[in-house]
Amino acid sequence: MNIWDQLVPDCPAPIAAAAAAALERVRPAWAQVDELVLRNQARVLAAFQEAGVSEVHFAASTGYGYNDIGREKLDELFARAFGAEAGLVRIQFASGTHAIATGLFAVLRPGDRLIAAAGAPYDTLQQVIDGAPGSLAEWGVRYEEVPLRPDLSVDPDAVAAAVRQPDARCLLIQRSRGYSLRAPLSVAEIGALIRRAKAANPAIIVLVDNCYGEFVEAQEPPHVGADLTCGSLIKNPGGGIAPSGGYIVGRADLVERAAAHLFAPGIGTEVGANAGVNRLLFQGLFLAPHVTGEALRGAQFTAAFFDLLGFRVRPAFDAPRSDLVQAVELGSAEGLKAFCQAVQKASPVDAHVRPEPWAMPGYTDPVIMAAGTFVQGSSVELSADGPVRPPYAAYFQGGLTREHVVLTALRAANELAAAGVLRA
């Protein structure tokens, strides 16, 4: 009996062989991740040391949160780690979408134009822009998407033309692929796009949706000129232990505007009780480079494994990466369901739950979502989801340990074989 038979009883021989071959394939790529993690850990450690983090900063605050020196230190720490002037880190952010929406409402005014640089943004953000009560459209903000090229790449010429319009105020750059099959944007590509946009319109404000991208490269968007960068603490920068929250980092004046929108003008960054979770937020950021590295290694294995099994994967296992998301095209609604249900079965929490597609708020198509996580919705732990529409791609991301990802991918392949989607 080989190890694969021990790990997954009755594992078909072709699936076991593909898993073993995939592990051999990814070893050189895993070595590159080792170097990346070391670089990012050094950057984060330096930020802790330069900020003078102390145990006193872990103390709880309640109510308004006035004079919370820990919260103030956390803002400074994120700014240092991300290469920004200022930071706004709060558990009062409910999600990454909430943080991004806060940044957009902070900088846009009636009559302004918001331009999305990479086609349609993530489904939930589309509702923020136009489609839900209280959206930017209700406030008189105009919106324009710059279409992707036929090869699904961003068109810098078209972006430059769009930001030259007299009412252009904010350029939104989504780093991750979202529910699309375009490649995520690297930090270098984001920097080149920012330089091109600001050459065309020096007053344009660039806001980067950084979800799923933190610590996947050795730099972050503020290092290459982003004015505001937003994300979620229950993704990469929370290290798998942050219980909630989000962050905004960037230009000090714009971060203050974001704080005024999140709380109230005149109060801004002075409030926001930490409710006793500060230590988890500090420690989560410290762990973030390592946890992100584990998730990256898991994604590389998943790509190699499912490629060997005959599925189309994006990106390839050895391709450069700028986010954690691994897309696996299943080809049918049945395949997508079987994949996500297998991920749920392989989870440490709620493994007995059977996810089904449903009309999730903020999404245009039924979505199936598997996430047996310790923190609800924490996609850095390990999750798989996707809209039930062609090409029926599962967006697989996260993993606190690479071993969990390997076991989950193996379970998914077996479930696909049992469902007749994979001929093993």
Image (cartoon, rainbow, N blue to C red):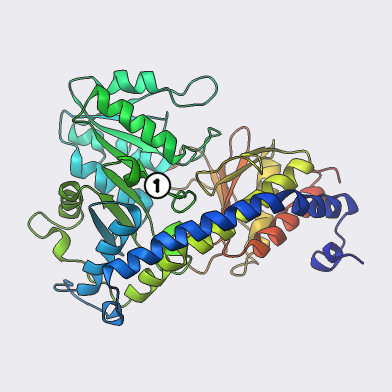
Residue type (three-letter) at the residue carrying disc 1: Asn
Q: Is residue 58 above or below residue 230?
A: below
Q: State the image coordinates of residue 158 (x, y, percent, origin top left).
A: 37, 19
- Report the front residue among 105 and 182: 182
Q: Is residue 47 left or right of residue 149?
A: left
- Residue 167, can we see it? yes
Q: Is residue 340 above or below residue 160?
A: below
Numbered-mark total: 1
Residue that appears at 74% across and 41% down: 307
Q: Quadrant of residue 206?
A: top left
Q: Residue furthest right?
A: 1
Residue 411 spot, x, y in % from top left:
74, 58
Residue 421 visible within the image: no
How far across and how far down the image is residue 262, in percent? 21, 55
Q: Position of residue 222 (x, y in %)?
A: 32, 46
Say whether residue 319 is left or right of residue 59: right
**Which residue shows up at 41% across the image and 72% down it?**
283
Q: Quadrant of residue 242?
A: bottom left
Callout 1 crowding tier (Cα within 10 Å): few <14, some 14–19, many ≥20: many
Badge 1 marks a residue whose secondary structure is loop
Which residue, given by chain and number where applicable, does mark 1 sit on?
210
Relative side of 189 to 140, left or right: right
**Quarter location, residue 160:** top left
Viewport quadrant of the N terminus: bottom right
Instruction: Identify which residue, 131 or 205, lies in the foreground.
Output: 205
